[in-house]
Image (cartoon, helix red, strand yellow):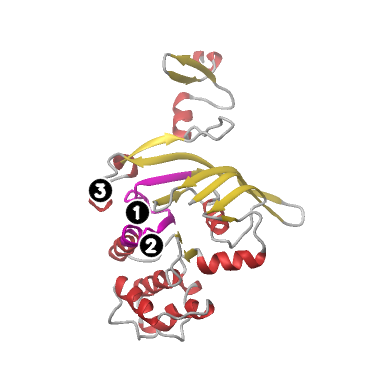
């Protein structure tokens, strides 16, 4: 569903260049539900904006389904955003029109695409648990209910890909679990591909695959130890439910997690040896003797 190869994004101002993504590689299978984590400034939100057609890459390759987002024209990106991708922000005010009811909000993107399916709009609001609140105006809904309206809006045009930027960042734990359950149901019943950017390690621990981004590159992946186990059954730390892997790009480069380097006292240089079926990374000999 998603292929990013050597993806680069550079933001330029008067005399300043910021490299937000520097050769990022990632693939996401159709029908997968996964999370992207990383510290502030790591590039994860930049990646999500590019996948959502909200920003353009500077170089590299990025494909979503049949769409080549590097070469797409502005008109093609508009079509892509209307028909292929749904987007949910942490700040749900970006998704909602406060002077309309919940149902009218869900119908709005359908109107923009030229076809209003009121039956499907009502069904979406039922799926997110707002059957009795669909005719209420936004100001009478709680923050959690508004976020669920935003999810219904993102699904209004039956996208193949759902992108969620910190979707549980402004709600309580109970509502966060409800939102994740909605994502999981849509993923299983509709075959929807779901990509979530989050700081919430508890939420990340409930999906089958987690990709960590550091300094604009994919650094490590966490794969659920038992993919057949219901994700909601495990509420522990990410490392308890998942196995961690370092990610190599096509040039053979990898990012070694910082705690490993600090423990071994490795700074700018290291020695590397093959021992049987292992590659062993060590601090230089002069540093080991000090």
In the rendered image, residue 198 lying in the magenta stretch gets the answer yes
Tell me the SS state at disc 1.
Answer: helix
> x%, y% of residue 230?
25, 50
Label 3: state its secondary structure: loop
- 54 or 176, which lies in front? 54
The residue shown at (55%, 27%) is 267
- On the image, which quarter does residue 71 sit in? bottom right
Q: Nearer the viewer, residue 164 or 285?
A: 164
Instruction: Give neighbour class at mark 3: few <14, some 14-19, many 20+ (Cα, 10 Å).
Output: some
Do the residues bearing badges 1 and 2 touch, measured as CB atoms within 8 Å?
Answer: yes
Instruction: Return the residue nearer the eye: 124 or 208.
Output: 124
Q: Which residue is mark 2?
A: 168
Q: Residue at image x 38%, y 78%? A: 121
- Circles 1, 3 touching at the beta carbon (< 8 Å): no
Q: Earlier in the sequence, mark 1 or mark 3?
A: 1
**Span colored in magenta:** 184-212
Q: Is residue 116 magenta?
A: no
Instruction: Please give the residue where the numbered disc 3 appears in the rendered image.
Output: 234
Q: How far apart, in angstroms, are the residues tagged by discs 2 and 3?
A: 18 Å
Sequence order check: which comes first, mark 1 or mark 2? 2
Q: Residues within 10 Å of mark 1 (few under 14, many from 20)?
A: many
Q: Are marks 2 and 3 in contact (CB under 8 Å)?
A: no
Estimate the x, y position of residue 260 in percent, counting from the top left.
44, 30
């Amino acid at each position: 569903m998603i292929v990013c190869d050597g993806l680069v994004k550079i933001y330029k101002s008067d005399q300043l260049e910021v490299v937000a993504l520097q050769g990022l590689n990632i693939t996401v299978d159709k029908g997968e539900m996964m999370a992207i984590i990383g510290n502030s400034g790591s590039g994860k939100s930049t990646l999500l904006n590019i996948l959502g057609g909200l920003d353009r890459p500077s170089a590299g390759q990025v494909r979503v389904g049949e769409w080549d987002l590097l070469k797409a024209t502005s008109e093609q990106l508009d079509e892509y955003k209307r028909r292929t991708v749904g987007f949910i922000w942490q700040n749900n005010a970006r998704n909602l029109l406060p002077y309309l009811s919940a149902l009218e909000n869900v119908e709005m993107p359908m109107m923009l695409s030229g076809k209003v399916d009121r039956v499907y709009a009502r069904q979406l609001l039922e799926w997110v648990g707002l059957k009795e609140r669909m005719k209420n105006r936004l100001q009478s809904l709680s923050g959690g209910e508004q976020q669920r309206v935003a999810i219904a809006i993102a699904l209004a045009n039956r996208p193949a890909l759902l992108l969620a930027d910190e979707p549980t960042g402004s709600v309580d734990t109970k509502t966060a679990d409800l939102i994740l359950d909605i994502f999981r149901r849509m993923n299983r019943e509709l075959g929807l591909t779901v990509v979530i950017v989050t700081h919430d390690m508890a939420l990340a621990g409930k999906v089958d695959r987690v990709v960590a981004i550091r300094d604009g590159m994919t650094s490590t992946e966490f794969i659920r130890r038992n993919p057949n186990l219901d994700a909601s059954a495990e509420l522990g730390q990410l490392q308890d439910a998942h196995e961690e892997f370092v990610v190599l790009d096509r040039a053979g480069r990898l990012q070694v997690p910082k705690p490993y380097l600090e423990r071994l006292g490795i700074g700018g240089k290291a020695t590397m040896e093959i021992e049987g079926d292992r590659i062993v990374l060590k601090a230089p000999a002069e540093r080991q003797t000090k």
